[in-house]
Amino acid sequence: MTAEALGVAETAVVVNPAVDPEDLLRSNTYSLLGHLLAAPPSEESLDLLGAIDPNAGADDTLLGAAWRMLQTAAGRTTVQQLDDEYHELFIGIGRGELMPYGSWYMTGFLMEQPLALLRTDLDQMGFQRQEGVAEPEDHAAALCEVMGMTISSGSTLEQQAKFFGRHIAPWMGRFFRDMQQAKCAHFYRAVGQLGEQFIDVETQAFSMAVPDVLKAAASTRMTVRANGSTNMKSDQEG
């Protein structure tokens, strides 16, 4: 399942050949997280994850350790086990153990003001909602894939930080931490670890490079809070 299948598609997605290799790695990491959050991984995906070099990024950082944990987890599970785990985590009977939606984490409800702001931003960025798709656009998988495409298309750091600060930073770190604590999570604990550490690195990088953009994004979130009956709370606010 892709961002398009989750209800978000861009009119023309182009990978800019001038994008820095480090940014391509960031883009690919977002895309990987989006892929793992959209559907349980296939046998091919497990093989690719299992082939991760355990010595890559062996710089004793938490992010490097998270990559190695994911490689190990991929070698200890099967496609059928992952299908069951994914269903219990995200689908369940009525609902799964986790709710992977921005509005849910920021307000406690689905389809709230954060989703309306996201839809406005997606439209301005050239992304359009697909007809016949039930999932709202603030699904974590869709947001990760949109962020990945934004980076790979050569968007400026300011544009990346604006989307990140409004729609990812306020809640996704907590979502990945909850994933690590979920009772039915096994393989997805490693996904949660990678996601948490990656979002933390991204937050620190944006805060150092374009702090004013992140502050403006936070201000926008507070304006939404003041104009609606929501209770938005970012990771940085506790």
Image: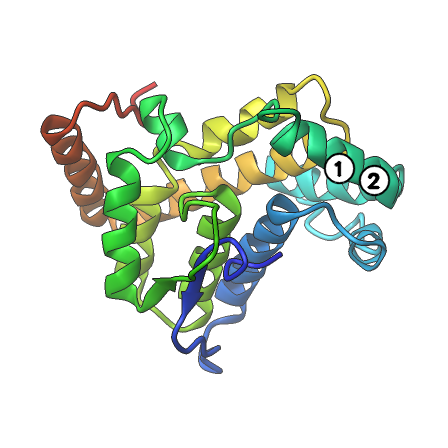
123, above or below 167, in the image: below
Kind of residue indicated by mark 1: Met
Badge number at residue 129: none
Residue reaching furthest bottom?
Answer: 17
232, above or below 51, in the image: above
The tally of labels here is: 2
Instruction: Decide which of 208, 121 is in the foreground and name it.
Output: 121
Residue 33, position as x, y percentages in the image: 59, 48
Residue 98, position as x, y percentages in the image: 57, 26
Identity of the residue drawn at 35% across and 25% down: 109
Quadrant location of residue 165? Answer: top left
* Residue at the disc numbered 1: 69
Sort mark 2 into few (<14), some (14-19) or many (20+) by Cα contacts within 10 Å.
Answer: some
- Tell me the element at label 1: helix
Residue 158 in the figure: left or right of residue 201: left
162, above or below 99, in the image: below
Instruction: Decide which of 5, 192 is in the foreground and name it.
Output: 5
Instruction: Check contact, mark 1 vs mark 2: CB within 8 A.
Output: yes
Quadrant location of residue 85? Answer: top right
Report, in whole angstroms, how far the alpha carbon at label 1 lies from the one at label 2.
5 Å
Instruction: Decide which of 214, 15 is in the foreground and name it.
Output: 15
Quadrant location of residue 235? Answer: top left
**Quadrant position of the C terminus in the picture:** top left
- Tell me the element at label 2: helix
Identity of the residue drawn at 84% across and 51% down: 50
* Residue at the disc numbered 2: 72
**Quadrant position of the N terminus in the picture:** bottom right
Residue 98 visible, this orientation? yes
Residue 178, position as x, y percentages in the image: 56, 23
Kind of residue indicated by mark 2: Thr
